[in-house]
Amino acid sequence: MKILLSAITLFFLLSCATANKSNYSKIEYEAGTCFGFCPIFKMTINPDRTAVLEAEHFNFTEGRSKDEFSKPREGTFKGTIKQEDYTKLVALLNSLNPGSMKDQYGRRDVTDLPTSYLRLHFNDGKAKTIEDYGKHGTPKLEQVYRFFEELRHNQKWEKVK
């Protein structure tokens, strides 16, 4: 009985350790401009959960105005992504099955939509870039984009530049 209990405990411990291990050496998300007030930023997240947010425009301001483009960029921020959010992000990315995804999504016949870039760098040295004009490539991609948008507001960011 003790052996069986020990085996079950070991199984669960290894399962948890594997679930928290990321296959990504770096995760990057970039949200580009549109003809409106789309947030313009780039976020880079490392496996140790340290992150850099390069905020250009429309990320932290309440009022939206085209005058914001004449203002300096909002800045560069550093932070550490909360463990539960990092775990959720990795699970979302894994659910995409990135290797099977197309490199480009979106219809180019509409001219006022933002382009997003999701760049995944894997531990084995491989990389996958997904360019999505309009940010509607697949429902799962849309979910990933929303998650990155939320990370700008639900993490603690310290301005460094």
Image (cartoon, grey):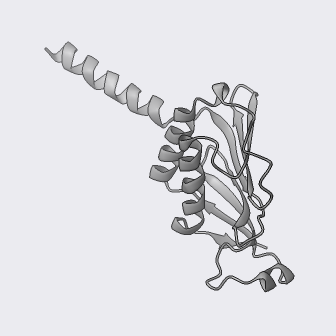
Rendering quarter of residue 70: bottom right
Query: Residue visible at 73% across and 63% down?
Result: 41
Which residue ends up furthest to the left in the rendered image?
1
**Is 137 displayed left or right of 21 in the figure?**
right
Where residue 15 appears, x then y in whole percent? Answer: 39, 27
**Tally of numbered discs:** 0
Where residue 4 appears, x then y in whole percent? Answer: 20, 14
Give the answer, above or below, for where 113 lies relative to 38: above
Rendering quarter of residue 130: top right
Q: Nearer the viewer, residue 115 or 81?
A: 115
Give the answer, above or below, for where 122 lies relative to 59: above
For the N terminus, the image quarter is top left
**Is 89 displayed left or right of 58 in the figure?**
left
Give the answer, above or below, for where 93 lies relative to 149: above
Q: Nearer the viewer, residue 139 or 14?
A: 139
Query: Residue visible at 64% across and 36% down?
Result: 24
Q: Nearer the viewer, residue 73 or 124?
A: 73
Where residue 96 appears, x then y in whole percent? Answer: 57, 34
**Is 91 displayed left or right of 137 in the figure?**
left
Rendering quarter of residue 161: bottom right
Which residue ends up furthest to the right in the rendered image?
70
Where residue 52 appears, x then y in whole percent? Answer: 70, 59
Query: Residue visible at 54% across and 54% down?
Result: 147
